Amino acid sequence: MTVGQTAINLPWVEKYRPSKLDDLVSHDDIVKTINQFMKENQLPHLLFYGPPGTGKTSTILACAKQMYTPQQFNSMVLELNASDDRGIGIVRGQILSFASTRTIFKAGPKLIILDEADAMTNDAQNALRRSKLMIMLYEY
């Protein structure tokens, strides 16, 4: 399978996911606020919540794609689906080791995205609060 064929076989939700914040639809105030934070290089810890399909994951991934080049993306962004990787071991191991390692590509903050963080165990959520590492996406 070639690179062109890989793009064709992607699910539509991935193939047509917005690649920059300005491509998002009907989140004008949120996009304006996040863009201002990024412009000032002061992106805070964020907690996105809402029902499924409202653009929480698309918003933060578009933000990440704006912050980092494609070469930097894998070394600067860790995306976990917290409903799969939900225990305290993931926080103590994978998340903290990712956050603490240096990268040769770019200085500055790394981005840790925890999709469906509401499915994490209480111990894991408490460990995250203590570590002060968070981008969490909650669904209700």
Image (cartoon, grey):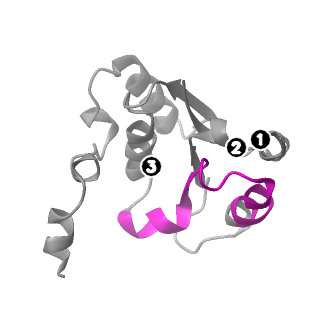
In the picture, the disc for residue 64 is: 3
Q: Earlier in the sequence, mark 1 or mark 3?
A: 3
* Residue 69 place in picture, x, y as percent: 38, 61
In the displayed structure image, the side of residue 132 where residue 60 appears, left or right: left
Callout in the foreground (3, 2): 2
User: Quick one: 52 or 91, which is closer to the camera?
Assistant: 52
Task: Assign the C terminus to one quadrant of the image.
Answer: top right
Query: Which residue position holds label 1?
Result: 125
In the picture, the disc for residue 120 is: 2
User: Quick one: 131 or 138, which is closer to the camera?
Assistant: 138
Marks 3 and 1: in contact by CB < 8 Å?
no
In the picture, the disc for residue 62 is: none
Callout in the foreground (1, 3): 1
Marks 2 and 1: in contact by CB < 8 Å?
yes
Give the CA separation, mark 1 to mark 3. 23 Å
Residue type at mark 3 is Ala
Residue type at mark 1 is Gln
Q: Quadrant of residue 49?
A: top right
